[in-house]
Image (spheres, rainbow, N blue to C red):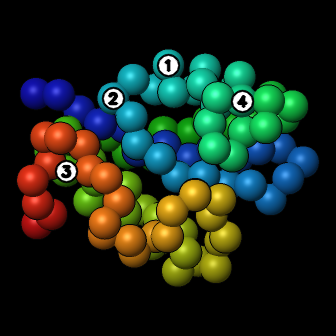
């Protein structure tokens, strides 16, 4: 069974918090650390990368959205580049539908 990791990134000295998902947290951490992401500017390399859940691959999209909504319910402003409830976001090819 292949799993997806749901993670949170906090950029120190900023208010930037990002929720994401990946099948390889080591590579994804490196991408964020080197500024190769939508919220990383390449200058702020001081970040905290926390895995908050590990879920079945087929449910990764659902749980990523769940945690985004959970953080939003706590009045935490996320720096994700797409609207939290935008169901038109391109889904991984393996996910046909949400439960």
Lower sequence index among marks 1 and 3:
1
What's the residue at 84%, 34% (across, down)? 44
Percent position (x, y) of residue 37? Answer: 62, 36
Describe residue 14's horizontal placement relative to residue 56 as left or right: right
For discs 1 and 4, the disc positioned in front in the rendered view? 4
Residue 87 position (above or below residue 63): below
Residue of label 4:
35
Q: In 3D space, how far apart are the residues under numbered discs 1 and 2 (Cα atoms)? A: 9 Å
Tell me what residue is drawn at x 56 percent, y 47 percent: 8
Tally of marks? 4
Q: Quadrant of the N terminus?
A: top left
Tell which tag, 4 or 2, sits nearer the viewer: 4
Callout 3 crowding tier (Cα within 10 Å): few <14, some 14–19, many ≥20: some
Q: Quadrant of the C terminus?
A: bottom left
Looking at this view, is 40 or 20 the one in front? 40
Real-space Cα separation, disc 1 to disc 4, in angstroms: 13 Å
- Residue 59 bears which disc, if any? 3
Q: Nearer the viewer, mark 4 or mark 3?
A: 4
Residue 94 on image: x %, y %: 13, 40
Q: Nearer the viewer, residue 92 or 25?
A: 92
Q: Answer whether residue 11 is visible to the viewer in this image.
A: yes
In the depicted structure, whether residue 19 falls above or below residue 98:
above
Whole-number angstrom distance, CA of label 1 to CA of label 3: 21 Å
Between the residue at mark 2 and the residue at mark 3, the CA separation in whole angstroms equals 12 Å
Q: Position of residue 32 (x, y in %)?
A: 64, 31
Q: Which residue is mark 1?
A: 27
Quarter location, residue 34 = top right
Q: CA distance from mark 4 to mark 3?
A: 27 Å
Q: Reading the chain from its start, which is encountered first: label 4 or label 3?
A: 4
């Amino acid at each position: 069974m292949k799993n997806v990791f749901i993670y949170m990134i906090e950029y120190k000295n900023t208010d930037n918090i990002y929720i994401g998902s990946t099948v390889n947290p080591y590579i994804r951490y490196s991408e964020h650390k080197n500024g190769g992401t939508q919220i990383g500017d390449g200058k702020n390399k001081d970040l905290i990368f926390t895995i908050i859940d590990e879920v079945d691959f087929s449910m990764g999209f659902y749980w990523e959205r769940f945690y985004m909504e959970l953080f939003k319910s706590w009045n935490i402003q996320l720096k994700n580049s797409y609207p939290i409830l935008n169901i038109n976001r391109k889904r991984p090819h393996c996910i046909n539908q949400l439960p």
